[in-house]
Each structure stands twice: as structure tokens, then as C-alpha cells.
Image (cartoon, rainbow, N blue to C red):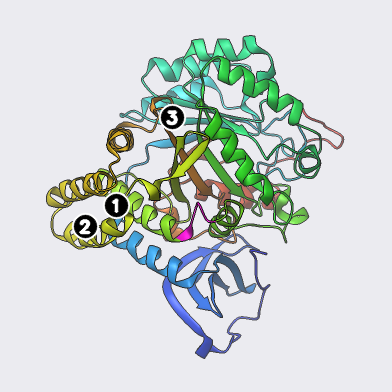
Amino acid sequence: MSDVGTARPTGASDDDSRVVTLRATRGTCPVCVEVVDARVVEVDGQVLLEKSCPHHGRHRALLSRHPRYFAELLEFFHDVMPESLPQRDFILRLTARCNMRCPICLASADEYQEEDLSQDALERFLSSRGRRLKLDLMGAEPTLHRDLEEIVRLAHDRGHITALHTNGLELQDPARLERLVAAGLDEVHLQFDGFADEHDLVLRGRPMRAARERVLASLEQHRVATDLVVTVLRGLNEAQMEPVLAYAAAHPFVKEVFYLGCRRLGRATEDFKDDCVAPDELIDDLERETGGRVARRDVRVFQKLYFSLLAAFRVRKCLYIHHYMVVRSKGGYRPVAELVDLAYLEPRLERFRRLLRRSRALAAPYLLLHAAVAVLRRRGLPLLLDGALLSLMLLLGFDLSRIKRRVILIGFITACDPWIHDVEVAANCGKGEVAGDVGTHDAGADANVARERLHRSGQLPRRAPGHGPA
């Protein structure tokens, strides 16, 4: 259970001798959704984000059950990452409408009267940004936007990367996918919670396996770079995590598998409040389900490498989201730890961390040199070329369609809700957001909180009772 503890009176003590403060910050009270004093603390072998609201007391949310792991990455992240960097990846909340009624919906689909994002609004936004962006076409279900193909074409013609996030129902029609690909769609992020209909009944309210199989076949036929997004609900579908990764290994059109923990947003706020999963917990789950092939000790070093590359190329990303990588092999996949000498690399990453404080011009070449040596020490020349391409993509824009067939990226991700919203972490949130209801935010985490605040205020009218999916 990710949320540990409830409101406590202001000033209440929790035996301060057992509490170690790792960092003071500011965060959002989950009751009034106002910014209050906060701190990251270690208590009894857990890392918690603690909010202290003068009106609603103290609230805590679980960040990690591995204090040494989390504290080490927390310190590394804040050492190497600037306070804030320009945003290069924006969610476009195209619509609040959906063709499903998922019990676990984080997007408040069909709950409020919200206008679709217009092409004019998008054009104004793009005109205000001078560089190449990645545009995540989202919402509730973006395929319901009547101008979706024109939006993809507009973004493509201006040189931006387009990524469609979808439940896939509208893509069962091969002609629809063909039109989107022709318009310039670069990648698809497909809701994919596993292979069992019984899990879908809990998460999605309907069986989805047959529909997903049709969509996957079409995506593979058209060679669309695809990310499988697995929403994990505690005690329900953890056993599906490895089979999804194995499927990705057998199908090279799949470039990425992301595991998303349930959070307190949208309809999940109350109905699944005891089933939230932090990204850190997902690492434990996948380590268990892969029999240790994906191991936390390796994720820790890989995450340091990832943070270092972000710092070297000045790309903003979130502290909470962790990454790893596997490489396709005969009969399955090999973890990157078998192909990169992580033990050699880790002390060089610490040296990079110190060097970065003195000279970025020296630190970046040092990092790239020793990353290459770490690969060559394991005779991984082909992976060296893949690593160079991935690094270049961080610099120029991360387009999954450019990833070579060997690599599968793994992400342990979250959607920031008021419980885990941390102002300092949000300053480097990896995605901004453009939306009709809350406007433009350089941090998607801030947009989530703004939307929760708007919904609780009653200013946005609800849809009429009985209004179903559009």
C-alpha cells in the first residue's frame, strides 16, 4: 500500500528519534491541494514524502522500501541536475472524452464538461516554442478527437515527434492506423495490462484481449514503433509483467515496455486508494517476476548513468521515474548488465558527478568515454552503436521509431498525484502539458495537481448524469 498514514494534527510527533530527514522541500496537501511545507523522510525502513498542512495535519506517502537505494539516487539526481531546464516534451490533452469507462481511469474521462483542444490553440502553442518538441497525444482517448489526423500532420510538418497514447479500440480499423501513419505518426503507446481478460474486467470494466491482439497485429504489420504501457494494480496483475516483456522481446516493433503504478487521480482517487503502487515498488515486482534477471542493484547503476546523460545533454526528467534496458537475444532477452560492465562504470559516474560541478565541457566527454569502455569491456560493440544512437536521441528528441531492433527500454513510471507531488521534483518533470481546462504547464505534475484543484473547486461543471462514453 503506497499511502501510509492519514491526517494527523499539526505538530504531532512520530517519535522523532526514528525519523531521518533526507531533504526539505515543498509539496501539495492531498486534502486542500495547496502547496505546504514537506520533507522526504526515512522511517522504519521506508522513505516517505511527508506533507505538513496547517489546516489538515500531516500526510505521508510511500516513495520507497529501500532507503539506501532511494537516498543514493536522490542525492545523485539533485547533484547533477540543474534546478530547471527547458521543457522539450509536452502532453497534448486533446479531449476528455473516451470510448471506455475504466474503473481505474486517472484522466477523469467523461466526468466534466471540457472542450476538446482546438487546432488553433495547438498552432498558437507551437508558434510560441522555437525548437523541436515531442508531442504526446493524450487526453482521455485522443483517437476520438475529430481532427486527430490533421493535428498529427501539422506537428509532423513542423518537424515535431508525435506519440499517440491510446486504449487501441479505434485502431482496430487498419485504415485508421494507415491514415495516421501517412499523416506522420511516429509512435504508439498502447494501454496493455496483460493477457488475461479477468484483469481487464477489474482495470477496464470489459475484456480487452481480443481487441488488443487485433491492434498489435496491425501495429506490427505497419511497423509502428510501439510502447506497451502496463498499469499495475497491487495484488492483481504483477504476474503479467514478465510475459509482456517476453512478448516485446519476440516482436521487434515493440521498442519499450513501461510499468505504470496506480495513483490517486481521477476515478482511482477513492475506488483504488489502497492499491497505489510507487515506481520503486515496480522494480521489486519485476525483479521477482523475472527471477532476478532484472535486478535492483543493476537498475541503480543504470539510473545513475541515465541521470548523468540527462545532465550532460541538459534534458529534464523526473526523479521518480526509473529506467532499465534489455537486449533481444536468441530465445528471449538479455539484461543490459550482461553487456555493460556496470561495476567498472559506477565509480566513473561518481567521478562525473564531481567533475560536472567544475566543468561541463570536460564532464560530458569523460562520461561518454567511460560509458563506451564499460561496453567494450564486455565485448558489446553492437550495443556501443545502439548506446550512441540513444544518447543522440536524448539530445535531438526521443523518437522510438529511431531505436534499432535489438533494444527494449523499460520504464518504471508514475503519474504525480497530490500525495506524491513535490515542487522541487516537478521542476524537472519530464513532460509538460497543454490542455483546455488548466492551460499550459511546463510540468505535467503541476498540471495534474491543478486539474485536481479545479475539479474539487466545483468551477468546472460535471457532465449530465447518465452521460456515457462518447
The amino acid type found where label 1 is placed reads Ser
Residue 364 in the image, given as x and y percentages of width and height: 19, 48
Q: Say which label, 3 or 2, has the lower sequence index.
A: 2
Task: Tell me what residue is drawn at x 28 percent, y 45 percent.
Answer: 375
What is the quadrant of residue 382 in the picture? top left
Location of residue 83 by image quarter: bottom left
Callouts 1 and 2 close, C-beta under 8 Å: yes
Q: Real-space Cα distance between discs 3 and 1?
A: 21 Å
- Dot 3 amino acid type: Leu
Query: Residue at horizontal 42%, vertical 74%?
Result: 22
Spatial distance from mark 1 to mark 2, Cα to Cα? 8 Å
Element on which disc 3 rests: helix
Q: Nearer the viewer, residue 454 or 59?
A: 59
Going from N to C along the chain, the mark reached first, 3 or 1, is 1
Residue placed under numbered mark 3 in the picture = 400
Name above or below for residue 185 compared with residue 38: above
Q: Which residue is mark 1?
A: 308
Q: Which residues are magenta?
A: 292-296
Write down the residue under mark 2: 352
Instruction: Find residue 14 and report its horizontal and vertical position in percent.
Output: 59, 85
What is the total number of numbered labels drawn onto the structure image? 3
